[in-house]
C-alpha cells in the first residue's frame, strides 16, 4: 500500500518505518527541509531503540523515502496520515494549527479519493475540523473529490515504540464508514494476524480514547504518590503497600511506583488538554484537576528531602 505521513517527529518516524518494514511504500513529509536532508543522509533526529536500523534497511530497500514537498506527499498515498505536533496553548488546550495546515495542504493538492488519518493526539472534534478544512479548500478550488477522515490514535511507549507498533495490544479505529474499516483493517493486517486487535468505534470516541488512556495512567501515578506521602506520615512502608495492592489483578503493578511525578512530552499536556476540553463542554473535571495538582506538588517533595 502507498502511505504518506505528514510529520517526521517521534510518531511519524516510528509509524513510517514500521509500515515500510511491513512492505508498504511510505513517503514521510516534513516542512523542515534541513531535517529531511539529514534523514536522507541517515541522521535520525530522535533516539528510539531499534529505529535507526529499521529506517536504514527500508530506505535501502526503497520502501521509505523523505520529502519536504506537500504536493508530492498528497499525490503519493491513498492513506494520508497526519502525525504533526499539537503543542499546548497557554490555557492548556491543544494547538491544532499544524494539524489543520496539513489538512488544507491535502485539500489543495488532492485529485482523487484519499483516506485522511489523524495519528496526532487531538481533542474530541478535531476530525470534524479536519474535514471542514479540507471541504473549504476543495470548495475554493471548485473541486468535488471524495475523502474520508479517520481517527487512529497512537499508543507508543518511549523506549519500546517499535515493539508496540509491530505487536500492538490494540489498534483503535474511529469511523462510521464500513469501507474505511476494511481499508484500515488491510493496512494493519501484518501487525494483527495472530489475534483480532482492531477496536472500531465512532470518531469522537476514538479521539477521547487516547486522552483517556494517558489520563488514567497519570491518575495512577498521582494516586500512588499521594499514598506515599500518607505512608510516610503514618509510619507505613509504601513499597510493601505497593506489593500488597499490585497483587490484585484489578490494579496490577504497572504505574504504581512512587516518585517525583509524571513528566515527559505527553502526560502533562494531555491531562491539561483533557481538563480544558471538559471545561469547554461545561464540566469541571475534578479528579483530573486533583491529578495535576498532586503531580505539581510532588515535584517539590524530592527537594524537601534533600
Image (spheres, rainbow, N blue to C red):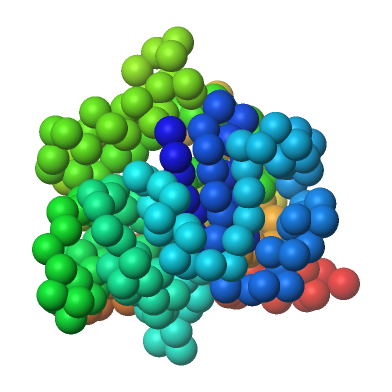
The residue located at (63%, 55%) in the rendering is 66
Frontmost residue, 266 versus 153: 153
Vertical placement of 27 versus 99: above or below? above
Q: Position of residue 29 (x, y in %)?
A: 55, 61
Q: Pick out the residue farthest to the bottom.
A: 90
Q: Quadrant of the C terminus?
A: bottom right
Q: How many marks?
A: 0
Vertical placement of 174 versus 194: above or below? below
Q: Position of residue 76 (x, y in %)?
A: 44, 50
The residue located at (40%, 55%) in the rendering is 75
Q: Residue 74, located in which quarter of the rendered image?
A: bottom left
Q: Position of residue 300 (x, y in %)?
A: 70, 76
Vertical placement of 172 versus 98: above or below? above
Frontmost residue, 278 versus 43: 43
The residue located at (71%, 67%) in the rendering is 35
Q: Position of residue 183 (x, y in %)?
A: 28, 32
Q: Pick out the residue farthest to the right.
A: 306
> Does residue 262 appear in the picture of this structure?
no
The residue located at (19%, 71%) in the rendering is 138
Q: Is 39 situated left or right of 73 in this image?
A: right
Frontmost residue, 101 versus 167: 101
> Does residue 97 appear in the picture of this structure?
yes
Q: Pick out the residue farthest to the top.
A: 194
Q: Quadrant of the N terminus?
A: top left
Q: Is 214 situated left or right of 225 in this image?
A: left
Amino acid at each position: 500500500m502507498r502511505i504518506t505521513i505528514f510529520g517526521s517527529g517521534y510518531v511519524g518516524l516510528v509509524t513510517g518505518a514500521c509500515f515500510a518494514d511491513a512492505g508498504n511504500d511510505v513517503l514521510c513529509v516534513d516542512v523542515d527541509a534541513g531535517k529531511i536532508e539529514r534523514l536522507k543522509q541517515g541522521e535520525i533526529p530522535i533516539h528510539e531503540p531499534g529505529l535507526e536500523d529499521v529506517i536504514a534497511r527500508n530506505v535501502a530497500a526503497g520502501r521509505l523515502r523523505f520529502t519536504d514537498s506537500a504536493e508530492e506527499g498528497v499525490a503519493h498515498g491513498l492513506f494520508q496520515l497526519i502525525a504533526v505536533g499539537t503543542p499546548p496553548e497557554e490555557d492548556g488546550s491543544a494547538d491544532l494549527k499544524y494539524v489543520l495546515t496539513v489538512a488544507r495542504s491535502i485539500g489543495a493538492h488532492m485529485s482523487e479519493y484519499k483516506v485522511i488519518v489523524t495519528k496526532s493526539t487531538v481533542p474530541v472534534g478535531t476530525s470534524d475540523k479536519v474535514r471542514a478544512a479540507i471541504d473549504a479548500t476543495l470548495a475554493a478550488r471548485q473541486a468535488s473529490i471524495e475523502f474520508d477522515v479517520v481517527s487512529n490514535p497512537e499508543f507508543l511507549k518511549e523506549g519500546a515504540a517499535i515493539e508496540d507498533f509491530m505487536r500492538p495490544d490494540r489498534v483503535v479505529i474511529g469511523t462510521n464508514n464500513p469501507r474505511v474499516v476494511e481499508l484500515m483493517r488491510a493496512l494493519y493486517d501484518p501487525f494483527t494476524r495472530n489475534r483480532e486487535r482492531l477496536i472500531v468505534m465512532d470518531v469522537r470516541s476514538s479521539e477521547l480514547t487516547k486522552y483517556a488512556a494517558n489520563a488514567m495512567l497519570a491518575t495512577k501515578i498521582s494516586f500512588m504518590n499521594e499514598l506515599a506521602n500518607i505512608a510516610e506520615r503514618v509510619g507505613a512502608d509504601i513499597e510493601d503497600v505497593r506489593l500488597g495492592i499490585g497483587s490484585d489483578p484489578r490494579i496490577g503493578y504497572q504505574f504504581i511506583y512512587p516518585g517525583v511525578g509524571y513528566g515527559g512530552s505527553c502526560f502533562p499536556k494531555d491531562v491539561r488538554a483533557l481538563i480544558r476540553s471538559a471545561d469547554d463542554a461545561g464540566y469541571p473535571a475534578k479528579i483530573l484537576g486533583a491529578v495535576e495538582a498532586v503531580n505539581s506538588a510532588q515535584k517539590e517533595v524530592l527537594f524537601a528531602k534533600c
